[in-house]
C-alpha cells in the first residue's frame, strides 16, 4: 500500500484494560464449574489416571492452605520456592493456585537443582524465599546440608516421610486456620512468577513474570485463531521438566475452565499416544523433534481427538510442518509458536490463513505482533531497523515481556526510547511485507565460517527431518576458517557415512559438517548435559569435543 513502511517494525495495538483481581479472573470458569476436572495425572506404564482433581476440591484445598500460610505470617509479595519433579504434578498445581490466591511470587525448580548447588545458592540468595516446598525428605536433607543463612518461615515437604523432622512440616498436615485468609491487594506490577532462562553457557537468569504479564500472556494465547481454550479442553503436558517450562499451557487451560493432563517422566511416543487416546486430549504442545518421534511411531489413529496443537520450543521448518500435517487429524488446527522465558506469546495468527515459510530457510512464520507488542528487527549491535525481508536481531517491547532480570543481570540486553522499554532477544529474525515474523536462529549460535553465516537450527532441522533423533550443532574455533560446525547426537540412528550421504543429497555443504559428527558416548557423556530448565549446555559439548580432538592430536604425534 502507498505510504506503508517498508522497515521491519510493527505494532499490534494497545492492550485491553486489565481485571482488578488475577485470582478472580483466573479462577472464574473453575468457580462456576466446580465439578469439572482441573487436573489429571496419567501413568503411561499402566495406562491409568493415578490422580485427578475437580475445580471445587482444588479451590477448597487452596483455601485451607492459604489460611494456614497467613496464620504463619506469609503475606502478599513473599516468595514461595517450589522444588518438585515431573511426578509431583498434583502438588505443583495446588501450590501454583495457592501462590495466586495469596499474591505470592511462585518460583518453581526441578529437583535436579540439588546436583547444581551453585545455581541453588544463587537462587536462594536472590529470591530470599519465605516458603520453601520440597518433594520428599531426601530433598529436605539436601537443603539442610547447604546451611543457607536465611531460614524460611515455612519449610514444607510434600510426600509423607518415614521419619519425622523437627524443621520440616508435611504439606498435607497443614490444617484449616481459625479465620479464612484475606484477599490481598495485588498490583499489576507485582511479581506473580519467577522462571529461569536457559543458562546454556552460565548461571540461569531469573525472569520476574508480573501480574500484568501473566494476564497479557493468557489473553494473547486465547486470541489466537482456533486456540479453543474452553471448559471441554484437555491439555496434554508431556514436556520433560514441564511444570516450570510449560506453565502457560496450564494457566491458559485453567483460565478457560479446562483440564490439564500431566504425563510423568519425559517425552515418549507410546506414553504420549496412550494418554491422548485414553483421555481424549484435545490440546498438546509439541516441539519439532517430538513430531519426528511420533511420526516414526506411525500410529496416527491414537491422535484423533486432538483439536489444537502448538508447535513450540523451537522454530519449525517446512518438513516438520508437513510431517505434523500427515500425522494429525485433518481438522486439527496447528499453531506455529515461539516464545522465551522472558515472555510469550509476542506473535501469532488471530484469523484463518495459511502458514507461510521464509524463502531461504523454509522456516514457518510465527504470525504478526499481537496486542500490546511492538517489534523491530535491527542491525546487529545497534537499533537501526533493517528493511523488510532482511535478517537482523529481533527487539521487542511488550506487555508480555519482562523489563529486567532479577539482580539487574545483563542490563545491556535492555534499552529505552519514546515507545518504552525494549528487550534485545538475541534471536535472528526476518519480517515479510505482511508483518509475519520468521525466527531464523539464535544470534549467538550463528557460526561464522570463512565470513559466511551458518545457522545451526537449519542444519538441525534437516537432520531431524531424515533421522528421528535429537541433533545439536555447535561452533568450534578454527585457526583458518574462524569457526566450523560440529554435530552431536545421543546415539547415531544410522552410520556416519549415511548422515554424510544424506547431507550431500539435501544440499548441505561439506563445510556445514566440517567439525565432525559425534555421539555423547564418544564425548564421555551418558546423557545430554542439561541445566535447571532442561536446556542443553552447549558449552559443555564444545569443551568435550575440543578436549577429544586435543587428545587425538597428541596421540598422533
Image (spheres, rainbow, N blue to C red):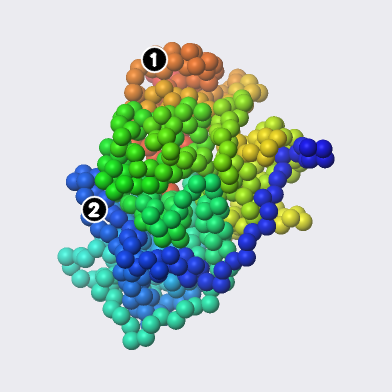
From the viewer's perspective, is residue 122 above or below residue 432?
Answer: below
Q: Is residue 177 above or below residue 411?
A: below
In this view, 505 is above or below 155: above
Q: Quadrant of the N terminus?
A: top right
Please state which of residues 486 and 102 is positioned toward the viewer in this rendering: 102
Quarter occupied by the C terminus: top left
Q: Residue placed at 50% from the left, 65% from the top?
A: 192
Between tags 2 and 1, which lies in front?
A: 2
How many neighbours does mark 1 have within 10 angstroms: few (below 14), some (14-19), or many (20 or more)? few
Query: Residue 236, percent across and down?
Result: 36, 48
Label 1: which secondary element: helix
Residue found at the far front of this picture = 331
Res 444 visible: no
From the top left corner, tell me how far across and down residue 406 is, in percent.
55, 60
**Image spot of residue 442 (x, y percent):** 57, 37
Q: Which residue has dot 2 on it?
A: 49
For image coordinates 53% across by 15% down, the residue present is: 507
Local crowd size for mark 2, using a 10 Å CA cut-off: few (<14), some (14–19), many (≥20): some
Residue nearest the viewer, comparing 260 with 190? 260
* Secondary structure state at the residue bearing disc 2: strand
Badge 2 or badge 1: first in the primary sequence = 2
Q: Provide the residue designation for mark 1.
A: 498
Amino acid at each position: 500500500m502507498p505510504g506503508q513502511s517498508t522497515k521491519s517494525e510493527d505494532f499490534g495495538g494497545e492492550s485491553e484494560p486489565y481485571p482488578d483481581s488475577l485470582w478472580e479472573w483466573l479462577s472464574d470458569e473453575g468457580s462456576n464449574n466446580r465439578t469439572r476436572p482441573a487436573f489429571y495425572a496419567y501413568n503411561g506404564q499402566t495406562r491409568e489416571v493415578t490422580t485427578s482433581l475437580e475445580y471445587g476440591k482444588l479451590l477448597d484445598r487452596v483455601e485451607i492452605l492459604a489460611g494456614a500460610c497467613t496464620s504463619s505470617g506469609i503475606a502478599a509479595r513473599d516468595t514461595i520456592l517450589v522444588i518438585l519433579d515431573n511426578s509431583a504434578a498434583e502438588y505443583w498445581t495446588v501450590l501454583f493456585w495457592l501462590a495466586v490466591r495469596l499474591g505470592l511470587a511462585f518460583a518453581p525448580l526441578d529437583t535436579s537443582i540439588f546436583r547444581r548447588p551453585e545455581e541453588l545458592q544463587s537462587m536462594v540468595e536472590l529470591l530470599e524465599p519465605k516458603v520453601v516446598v520440597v518433594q520428599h525428605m531426601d530433598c529436605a536433607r539436601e537443603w539442610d546440608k547447604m546451611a543457607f543463612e536465611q531460614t524460611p518461615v515455612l519449610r514444607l515437604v510434600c510426600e509423607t516421610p518415614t521419619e519425622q523432622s523437627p524443621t520440616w512440616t508435611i504439606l498435607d498436615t497443614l490444617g484449616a486456620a481459625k479465620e479464612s485468609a484475606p484477599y490481598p491487594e495485588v498490583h499489576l506490577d507485582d511479581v506473580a512468577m519467577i522462571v529461569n532462562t536457559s543458562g546454556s553457557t552460565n548461571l540461569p537468569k531469573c525472569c520476574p513474570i508480573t501480574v500484568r504479564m501473566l494476564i497479557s500472556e493468557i489473553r494473547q494465547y486465547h486470541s489466537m485463531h482456533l486456540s479453543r481454550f474452553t471448559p471441554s479442553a484437555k491439555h496434554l503436558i508431556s514436556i520433560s521438566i514441564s511444570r516450570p517450562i510449560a506453565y502457560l499451557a496450564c494457566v491458559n487451560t485453567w483460565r478457560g475452565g479446562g483440564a490439564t493432563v500431566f504425563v510423568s517422566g519425559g517425552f515418549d511416543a507410546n506414553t504420549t499416544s496412550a494418554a491422548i487416546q485414553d483421555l481424549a486430549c484435545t490440546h498438546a504442545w509439541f516441539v519439532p523433534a517430538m513430531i519426528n518421534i511420533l511420526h516414526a511411531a506411525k500410529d496416527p489413529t491414537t491422535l484423533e481427538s486432538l483439536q489444537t496443537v502448538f508447535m513450540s520450543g523451537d522454530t519449525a521448518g517446512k518438513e516438520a510442518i508437513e510431517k505434523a500435517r500427515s500425522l494429525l487429524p485433518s481438522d486439527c488446527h496447528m499453531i506455529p509458536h515461539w516464545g522465551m522465558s522472558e515472555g510469550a506469546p509476542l506473535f501469532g495468527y488471530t484469523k484463518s490463513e495459511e502458514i507461510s515459510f521464509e524463502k531461504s530457510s523454509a522456516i514457518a512464520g510465527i504470525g504478526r505482533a499481537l496486542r500490546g507488542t511492538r517489534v523491530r528487527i535491527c542491525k546487529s549491535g545497534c537499533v537501526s531497523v533493517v528493511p523488510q525481508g532482511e535478517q537482523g536481531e529481533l527487539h521487542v517491547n511488550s506487555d508480555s515481556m519482562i523489563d529486567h532480570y532479577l539482580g539487574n543481570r545483563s542490563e545491556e540486553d535492555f534499552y529505552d526510547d519514546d515507545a518504552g522499554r525494549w528487550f534485545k532477544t538475541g534471536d535472528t529474525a526476518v519480517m515479510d511485507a505482511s508483518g509475519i515474523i520468521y525466527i531464523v536462529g539464535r544470534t549467538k549460535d550463528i557460526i561464522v565460517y570463512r565470513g559466511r553465516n551458518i545457522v545451526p537450527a537449519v542444519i538441525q532441522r534437516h537432520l531431524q527431518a531424515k533421522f528421528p533423533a535429537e541433533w545439536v550443532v555447535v561452533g568450534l574455533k578454527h585457526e583458518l576458517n574462524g569457526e566450523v560446525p560440529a554435530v552431536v547426537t545421543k546415539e547415531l540412528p544410522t552410520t556416519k557415512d549415511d548422515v554424510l550421504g544424506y547431507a550431500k543429497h539435501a544440499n548441505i555443504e561439506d563445510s556445514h559438517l566440517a567439525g565432525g559428527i559425534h555421539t555423547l558416548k564418544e564425548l564421555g557423556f551418558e546423557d545430554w548435559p542439561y541445566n535447571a530448565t532442561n536446556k542443553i549446555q552447549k558449552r559443555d559439548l564444545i569443551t568435550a569435543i575440543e578436549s577429544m580432538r586435543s587428545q587425538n592430536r597428541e596421540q598422533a604425534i
